[in-house]
Amino acid sequence: MSADDTDTATLTSSYTEMTEMLLPNDTNALGRALGGVVLHWMDICGAIASLRFSNQAVVTASMDHVDFKAPIDLGEIAVIEAYVYDTGRTSVNVKVDVHAENPRAGDTRETTSSFLTFVAIDDSGNPTAVPDLLCETDNEQALQEQAKAERKAELEALVERLDD
């Protein structure tokens, strides 16, 4: 089904969760996840969420500021979650969060988050329309509002840093 076949899609229809175990090949000399590997996982998870939402091929247009808040250690499980929280005519905005899970201790911690934008493309590689976002439940509405507020605060902080 293409975006032309439907006018709306839900936030829940885009929700994607991936898990990756951090293995030695993806670590630095300290036994922690390489930043580029984490960014790669985030890009893939965001792209899947965008594809599920739009039913179109997508390309990454941008990734907002990324802070690595906590490390992911060798042997831990990275849980990457993404969902579409806003749309444009041909673009979808996706919130991506990464948590580290220590399966032996049973604890989790937030490690990374960012906002990514993807553009839907047709078979010729041209931008194509995406559905409007529909938030049918209170939970969907809360996730959308939270993501918009977090992104707004992040962009305001960036402007403030640039003004200094």
Image (tube, helix red, strand yellow):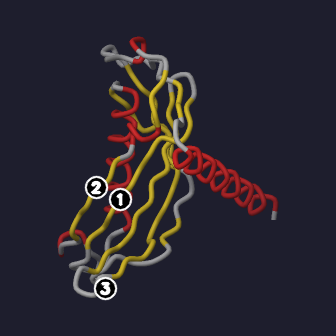
Q: Is residue 89 above or below residue 71?
A: above
* Residue topped by disc 2: 18
Disc 1: CA contacts within 10 A as few (<14), some (14-19) or many (>=20) = many
Residue contact between numbered discs 2 and 3, judged by CB atoms under 8 Å: no
Judging depth in this view, the residue of 105 and 44 nearest the camera is: 105
Q: Residue at x 69, y 53 (%)?
A: 155
SS at circle 1: strand
Q: Is residue 121 above or below residue 13?
A: above
For marks 1 and 3, the one nearer the N-term is 3
For marks 2 and 1, the one nearer the N-term is 2
Q: Is residue 24 left or right of residue 123?
A: left
Q: Is residue 113 above or below residue 47?
A: below
For marks 2 and 3, the one nearer the N-term is 2
* Residue topped by disc 3: 30
**Residue flagged by tag 3: what amino acid is it?**
Leu
Which of pointers 2 and 3 indicates the residue nearer the eye?
2
Q: Is residue 97 above or below residue 130?
A: below
Disc 2: CA contacts within 10 A as few (<14), some (14-19) or many (>=20) = some
Q: Residue at x 30, y 80 (%)?
A: 73
How far apart marks 2 and 1 lie (CA) works out to 5 Å
Judging depth in this view, the residue of 66 and 16 nearest the camera is: 16
**Residue flagged by tag 2: what amino acid is it?**
Met
Q: Residue at x 56, y 46 (%)?
A: 138
SS at circle 3: loop
* Residue topped by disc 1: 80
Residue 110 picture location, percent across and down? 45, 72
How far apart marks 2 and 3 lie (CA) works out to 24 Å
Judging depth in this view, the residue of 84 and 13 nearest the camera is: 13
